[in-house]
Image (cartoon, rainbow, N blue to C red):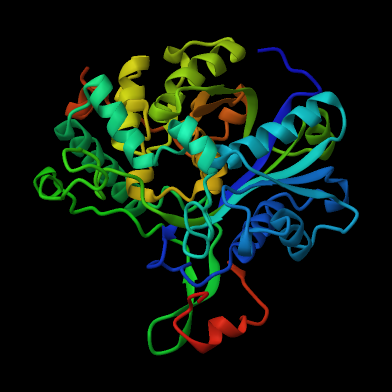
């Protein structure tokens, strides 16, 4: 593909570890602190950049209220040392917020409005619950259009029933996700992309300092037999449950992007090139099919086919919808979520798009591969996808080539930054909850 001075290149992509909401290493950590750590980590990997050259800081979060409100992008950017002359904004497209931040800033770079942007996403589902602190659906709209407020778990059941995704296949998919994630963690595959964070947790006796650098959600001992014993979580006759649905999580991720001409002027190595982005609308009652519609559009914009893609990162909101999308698109399962997905590693809503982008780019480098796709479904009935490429020169400095044997496809596929500052009074006085 021909190079263009306004191509959007990614020169740094990092994330924090992702931990279990209410239980993990970040359960007592503010999201603005998590985001600050991620932003610092992304900037630290490009020491030749003058932060004053950043044109905008664009951050996604799904629930922009409480500790994630007040334009958290601006708060964390300043805390990370970005000059006050650099603006910042927080955007929201639910589960694709972190990917939308990348696309939003990339469009501005391509338009020539600025040359450099710091993008990413953050979500603390420990601090801000799904739906926010005060969910208040519009009664009139709910009466006339109940599908708009369809619970995510019910949309999963709708997909499973409408498209014939069995519970047995969903459970097998979940087991595979956990096995791949556990193996990746054991092999240290996420080390290059994770920024260790020193923070504090309340353990029932008092506060203690911890360094969080490993995802804590993967369950290596998950079995199909064990999952079969779990009760459905959303419908008495359903198939979705805690073991084959994404985990509620806490985390942040950041990506530093710029025009190709800016990167070349600074002599920077390019981690990847953003080649396309697509966002689509689908029936809210089956919102999980979003990737099956968005991915073909992103591939078309990039001028490639699914067979050209080396690695797909498709968010596992639920096994039902992820499995449906893989089957509908005819993707080789051996190229999908090669290091596990959200069922095992967690889904910190607004962070996920940026997190998956970091994971994808580092995996492409490890494999010395060319094309990758990030995609996810979006609450309310949408889907988003982005195509990223690596060029020949960049591929020459790969970490090492890897890959999965298609013959090993699972059964379901055959068809440190220290957080500083004072802890709020509510943190010091009790169990670390906000109430």
x and y, in percent, of residue 16 in the image: 53, 57
Q: Nearer the viewer, residue 282 or 104?
A: 282
Q: Residue sitting at 26 percent across and 50 percent down?
A: 242
Q: How many marks?
A: 0
- In the figure, is residue 60 to the left or right of 51? left
Q: Where on the picture, by quarter, is residue 217?
A: bottom left
Residue 96 at least partly seen: yes
Position of residue 159 relative to residue 366, above or below, is above
Position of residue 115 relative to residue 197, above or below, is above
Residue 366 at least partly seen: no
Q: Residue sitting at 57 percent across and 52 percent down?
A: 63
- In the figure, is residue 23 to the left or right of 233? right
x and y, in percent, of residue 59 in the image: 68, 47
Q: Residue sitting at 45 percent across and 50 percent down?
A: 190
- In the figure, is residue 340 to the left or right of 290? left
Q: Residue sitting at 34 percent across and 30 percent down?
A: 321
Position of residue 25 relative to residue 266, above or below, is below
x and y, in percent, of residue 371 in the image: 52, 23
Q: Image quadrant for the N terminus? A: top right
Position of residue 16 relative to residue 381, above or below, is below
x and y, in percent, of residue 255 in the image: 65, 44
Q: Residue furthest right?
A: 85
């Amino acid at each position: 593909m021909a190079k263009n001075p306004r191509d959007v290149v990614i020169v740094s992509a990092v994330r924090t570890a992702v931990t279990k909401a209410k239980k993990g290493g970040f359960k007592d950590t503010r999201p603005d602190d998590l985001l600050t750590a991620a932003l610092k980590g992304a900037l630290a990997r490009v020491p030749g950049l003058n932060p004053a050259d950043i044109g905008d800081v664009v951050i996604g979060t799904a629930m922009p209220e409480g500790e994630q409100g007040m334009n958290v992008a601006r708060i964390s950017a300043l805390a990370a040392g970005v000059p006050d002359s650099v603006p910042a904004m927080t955007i929201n497209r639910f589960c694709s917020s972190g990917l939308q931040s990348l696309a939003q800033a990339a469009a501005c770079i391509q338009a020539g409005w600025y040359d450099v942007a710091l993008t990413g996403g953050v979500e603390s589902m420990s601090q801000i619950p799904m739906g926010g602190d005060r969910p208040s659906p519009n009664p009139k709209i709910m009466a006339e259009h109940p599908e708009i407020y369809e619970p995510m778990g019910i949309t999963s059941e709708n997909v499973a029933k409408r498209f014939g995704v069995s519970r047995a296949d969903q459970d097998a998919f979940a087991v595979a996700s956990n096995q791949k994630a556990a193996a990746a963690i054991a092999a240290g595959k996420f080390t290059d992309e994770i920024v260790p964070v020193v923070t504090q947790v309340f353990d029932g006796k008092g506060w203690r300092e911890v360094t969080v650098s490993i995802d804590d959600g993967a369950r290596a001992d998950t079995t199909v037999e064990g999952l079969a014993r779990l009760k459905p979580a959303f419908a008495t006759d359903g198939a979705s449950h805690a073991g084959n649905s994404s985990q509620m999580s806490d985390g942040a991720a950041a990506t530093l992007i710029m025009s190709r001409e800016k990167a070349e002027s600074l002599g920077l190595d390019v981690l990847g090139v953003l080649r396309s982005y697509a966002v689509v609308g689908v029936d809210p009652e089956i919102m999980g099919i979003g990737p099956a519609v968005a991915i073909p559009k992103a591939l078309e914009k990039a001028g490639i086919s699914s067979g050209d893609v080396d690695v797909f990162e498709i968010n596992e909101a639920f096994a039902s919808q992820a499995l449906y999308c893989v089957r509908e698109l005819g993707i080789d399962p051996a190229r999908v979520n090669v290091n596990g997905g959200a069922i095992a590693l967690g889904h910190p809503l607004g962070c996920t798009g940026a997190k998956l982008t970091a994971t994808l780019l580092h995996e492409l480098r490890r494999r010395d591969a060319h094309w990758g796709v990030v995609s996810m479904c979006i609450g309310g009935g949408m889907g988003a996808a982005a195509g990223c490429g690596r060029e020949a020169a960049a591929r020459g400095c790969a970490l090492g080539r890897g890959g999965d044997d298609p013959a090993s496809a699972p059964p379901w596929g055959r068809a440190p930054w220290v957080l500083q500052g004072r802890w709020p009074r509510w943190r010091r006085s009790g169990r670390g909850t906000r109430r």
